[in-house]
Image (cartoon, rainbow, N blue to C red):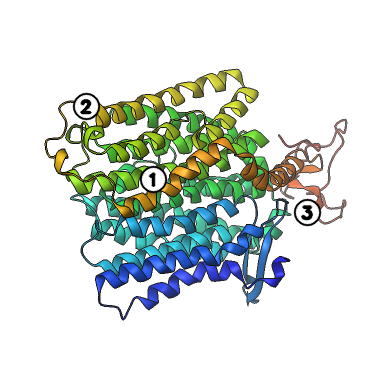
Amino acid sequence: MDQTSYYPVLTVLTFFPLLAALALAPIKSEIRVRQVTLVASLLELVLAIPLACFKAQSGFQFLETVPWSEDWGLTYAMGVDGISILMIWLSILTLPFCVLCSWTYIGRRVKEFHVCLLIMTTACVGVFSALDLVLFYVFWEALLIPMYLMIAIWGGDQKRYASIKFFLYTLAGSTLLLVAIVALRITGGTFYIPELMQKGFSYNFQYWIFLAFFIAFAIKVPMFPFHTWLPAAHVQAPSAGSVILAAVLLKMGTYGFLRFSLPLCPLASVHFAPMMIAISVASILYGGAVALGQNDIKKLIAYSSVAHMGFVTLGIFLFSPDGVNGAIFQMLNHGIITGALFMMIGAVYERSHSREIAKNLGLGKYLPHFMFFWGLFGLASFGFPGTNGFVGEFMVILAAFKESVTLGLLVIPGALLAAAYILKVTLKMAWGEPPSPKGHDWKDLKKKEWAYLVVPAALVIYLGLAPTGLLGLIGPSVDDTLAQFKAKREDVNVIYVTSPAGRPQGLFYERDLPPDPAEPDRATVPPTSPEPQSQAPAQEAK
């Protein structure tokens, strides 16, 4: 069936959770609030069925374009490609799991909590669907308040510190992102992302835009050393907050690198690639080393996210099909695995009222089904063959070795550290001595816990054994993105432009300059010309 025959699926998926949040307003019963939110989350999955018709081809699909404000050049534009389709599915799938894992965990202000969940789902789907920079920024900022409230109201003992730190870090990055968006509108003449992707900007312009993007997205990933807000936020947030933070919010940063940095700033991306690779390797090693020394289970998994997301950014800035495909696949895998681990941490906390490893020893004796799922997700977390975590990580490591044997060898210790800290916590929780004294009174998995663990477990195994389907789905979009990136990077028609006063203005794509060779500031000089140095010869972008 042709995609145009469907209802505006992306708009419906984006704003249906918001309508569900409004529908909660008159409901007074807490159990009814939970039930309505769960039903709404399942309906969201049903409404997403048309996305199953997404075709493995380049370009945006399910396009929706409506004039928004012609005076400002704004367009309500939404669409998906292979880079964003998996993130939309991940956002939608996370919502019912968050509702289930908070069913008994959240005992106060239940309505407000579920309203925050629904608003965050709207913002997440909107971020990955928006094709207008202003629309993207609106959804990007819309995530800030509900996540802040989730930490500040339903968080732990240090919730005030964690929520303010999260707010300030994210707001600082968002401010720079807004500056970059305004600069792109002034220089590019539009907010429409596909149109901006076809333009070429001066090297100096790309340089500063890339830096603004880098800080905004690096905070969101988070990359070392912008990561310090993440452990505090994870530890203090309720289980559902940690799940949506790890599964979806962190992916917004890496998505930004793929959607904006590479297509809009190709020359700057190449220039800063060594820095990005170095920071990614530092994130992998630092995150793994710090996670190994943690005694708090939640903090351990939080630091592991720094390491895992380091593999994602590394794959992106290797600029190879294996690296980028592996990075996108790892984004999905990390969302599934780490989201499930945070749900399980919430489940064990409800029993022991502690996240310390020392107070959750020997659970294999009392909670065998629980430890089975923990072991499965733990194996997937450090990339055990046959699980989904292995596929994405292996592709990134393979791309790293193809780029440089030295780089590949630097990444290997990160994989070994992941095995060390996961096996450490798993072995102690399963067979540690002495077993938790109250463990014999604990019940094994409840029905709702089975419900939110079976699906991620099935995805871990299926994607680990049969990843080619999803890789084939995202492959054409990745190939098209890299082809356009390579064409811009290797474009020989790049001119070094100087002003009439002889001041350098940077590299410009020749096709973007008016065809007027008489202008002294845009004229090129052959390599053998004895003309003044203010007009340098045409050169290839590096």
Q: Nearer the viewer, residue 380 or 232?
A: 380
Left or right relative to 461: residue 538? right
Q: Are marks 3 and 2 in contact (CB under 8 Å)?
A: no
Residue 512 circle label:
3
- Name the spot of residue 428 as percent of width and height, x first: 25, 28
- Label 1 vs label 3: CA separation? 49 Å
Identify the secondary structure beneath mark 1: helix
- On screen, residue 507 versus residue 214, left or right, reads right
Q: Amino acid at mark 1?
A: Ala
In this picture, is 3 found above or below 380? below
Residue 340 badge: 1
CA gap, disc 1 and disc 2: 22 Å
Q: Residue at x 27, y 69 (%)?
A: 31
Nearer the observer: mark 3 or 2; the answer is 2
Q: Which residue is mark 2?
A: 432
Q: Pointer 3: residues within 10 angstroms few (<14), some, or many (20+)?
A: few
Choose top left, top right, bottom left or bottom right for residue 369.
Answer: top left
The residue carrying pointer 1 sits among few (fewer than 14), some (14 to 19) or many (20 or more) residues within 10 Å by Cα, namely: many
Query: Distance of mark 3 from mark 2, alpha carbons?
Result: 66 Å
Q: Earlier in the sequence, mark 3 or mark 2?
A: 2
In the image: residue 291, left or right of residue 358 = right
